[in-house]
Amino acid sequence: MNSEPWPPTPEPLAFTDPWEYELAFPGDPRGPGIARMTLRAVLAAHGVPELIERAELLTSELTTNSVRHAKGSASVRMRWAHPVLRVSVSDTAPYLPAALRSPSPEAGSGRGLFILDRVADRWGGCALGDTLLGPGGKSVWFELAVRTGPPPPETPRPLAA
């Protein structure tokens, strides 16, 4: 009798192997929270915990702006190419964010790009062209780099006698 699982379980990706995930969500106030939870789970599963807090904050800013200002659905794409994580948020709004400016201390909003500029290692945006499914929109992205090496390999524990 064969004790191998079927179908065979693939080996996990190495820390330095590239990967990509994408989540589409409706223009609903719950979308940013779902995007944050998904991003947290992906980064934890791939052993990149040092980026979780900054990536969550920036993803929250971009997805909240998307829900607030765009009509329709949006998507979050997470792409890892060691040592850089790139997260992009795409939506149907045809305009790119206004130029970066320091927010007024009295303003109740308008700090998203300011936070993005201070926390991200790099960021930018681009217009998306029209498709067969309708008019294009925009994509705003940020990058965060890992400052440490890969996690140490797990050491097998000796079996008890």
Image (cartoon, grey):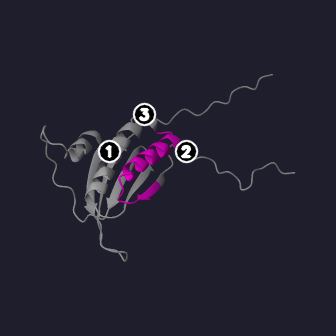
Camera-side residue of 104 and 54: 104
Out of 84 and 106, give the one closest to the viewer.
Answer: 106
Amino acid type indicated by mark 3? Thr
Estimate the spatial distance between the alpha carbons at disc 2 and disc 1, rounded to whole Å.
Answer: 26 Å
Amino acid bearing label 2: Ala
Task: Classify mark 3: residues with Cα within 10 Å, few (<14), some (14-19) or many (20+).
Answer: few
Amino acid type, residue under disc 1 in the picture: Leu
Q: CA distance from mark 3 to mark 2?
A: 15 Å
The first of marks 1 and 3 along the sequence is 1
- Residue 32 in the magenta stretch? The answer is yes
State which region is magenta: 21-48
The answer to which of marks 2 and 1 sits earlier in the sequence is 2
In the rendered image, residue 50, in percent from the top left (x then y), is placed at 42, 35
Q: What residue is shown with label 2?
A: 14
Where is residue 148, by image quadrant? top left
Question: Which secondary structure lies at badge 1?
Answer: helix
- Of the residues tagged 1 and 3, which is closer to the observer? 1
